[in-house]
Amino acid sequence: MSLRDLEYIAAVAEHLHFGRAALACGVSQPTLSGQLRKLEEFLGVEIFERSPRGVLVTRRGEEVIAQTKRIIAEARRLFEVVRIGAEPLTGTLRLGVISTLGPYLVPFLLKPLRARYPDLKLMLHEGHTRVLVRQLEEGELDALLATSPIAEAELTELPLFREELALAVPRDHPLAQVEVVNPQDIPMAELILLTEGHCLREQALQLCPSRLREGATELQAASLETMRQMIAAGSGVSFMPQLAIQVGALLDDMVAYRRIAGGQHMRDVALFHRPSFGRIRDIRLLRQSIGEILAEQSAVKVHRPGRPAG
């Protein structure tokens, strides 16, 4: 039994499909299926139940998969420990970025990071917070760029910056005629929320939960760009992070962005890692580099930790 065999188990458990698992592992489906059969015979346990309707995990298989993921995470940590003495920020670093942040922050970072650390191979994984947190905890990611706080996860948080949430409204909306919007004037019945799994959805619900219950909004969008297009079409209004406003300017002639009075509509962005991660020095250096790059980009309107958000 090899580490590669364990990776086959983890891949099938994740995809519940032999073809997609084989593709993810870079092998043919017959190779993966045959090796898993041999492994099940060796262990004396049926890990997966094969049927015409798909792949199911058996009760005993759940225990095997849980242990498999722990072994893979520890094996990866071994390689991390070996690399500690190497040059800073070299080799592969697997960085997760939440989908409401990645398309708007990453373009500012990639070229400067490549110039600073030419031997760094940054592998980016975009997705929902909960999925990325699970991948970070299980060792599939090395670090995560997400909004703070992250509940129910034992992760180390390194604050990066704070960005303002503006109210995005159609250009012909009455609120487009005012400079600063009073929170009580936000039309909750028109509010567009992101779908389940987006942390920005949860933040919108926390900002004004009672009024949202009263408004009983049913408008939802799968992404920030879909939301922006819905606003441009006059379907409603919503909260939009500052970076998304700056980068996604294609619909600016159809969408107006207005500050919200009170200064409470903000989101904190941080870099997260496992406390036991062997390359903590690299993660802290990455955090420092991101902060310096954003400071150099005068067009990026974010607030660094320790500075007032005014």
Image: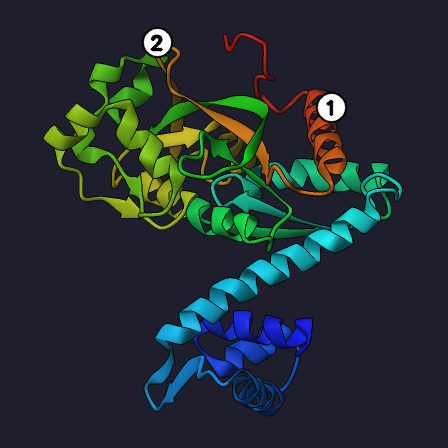
For discs 2 and 1, the disc positioned in front in the rendered view: 1
- How did the renderer colour the structure? rainbow
Can you name the residue that lies furthest to the front here? 44
- The location of residue 144, given as percent across then percent down, is 58, 41
User: Which residue is disc 1 drawn over?
Assistant: 292
Binning the other alpha carbons within 10 Å of mark 2 as few (below 14), some (14 to 19) or many (20 upward) gives few
Front residue of 219 and 21: 21
In the displayed structure image, the side of residue 228 where residue 76 appears, left or right: right
Question: Marks 2 and 1, Cα distance to the nearest angstrom?
Answer: 29 Å
Inspect the image, locate mark 1, and give the three-letter code of the amino acid beneath it. Glu
In terms of secondary structure, where does tag 1 sit?
A: helix
The disc placed on residue 19 is none
Front residue of 268 and 212: 268
For the question of whether residue 170 can be seen, the reply is: no
- The location of residue 23, given as percent across then percent down, is 59, 77
In the displayed structure image, the side of residue 119 where residue 29 appears, left or right: left
Counting labels gives: 2
For the question of whether residue 82 can be seen, the reply is: yes
Q: Residue at x 55, y 62 (%)?
A: 69
Q: Residue at x 29, y 40 (%)?
A: 193
Q: Residue at x 16, y 24 (%)?
A: 210
The disc placed on residue 262 is 2
| 175 to 14, vertically: above or below | above
Whichever of callouts 2 and 1 sits on the residue coming sooner in the sequence is 2
In the displayed structure image, the side of residue 221 where residue 131 appears, left or right: right
| 116 to 7, vertically: above or below | above
Q: Residue at x 76, y 34 (%)?
A: 281
Inspect the image, locate mark 2, and give the three-letter code of the amino acid beneath it. Gly
Front residue of 12 and 20: 12
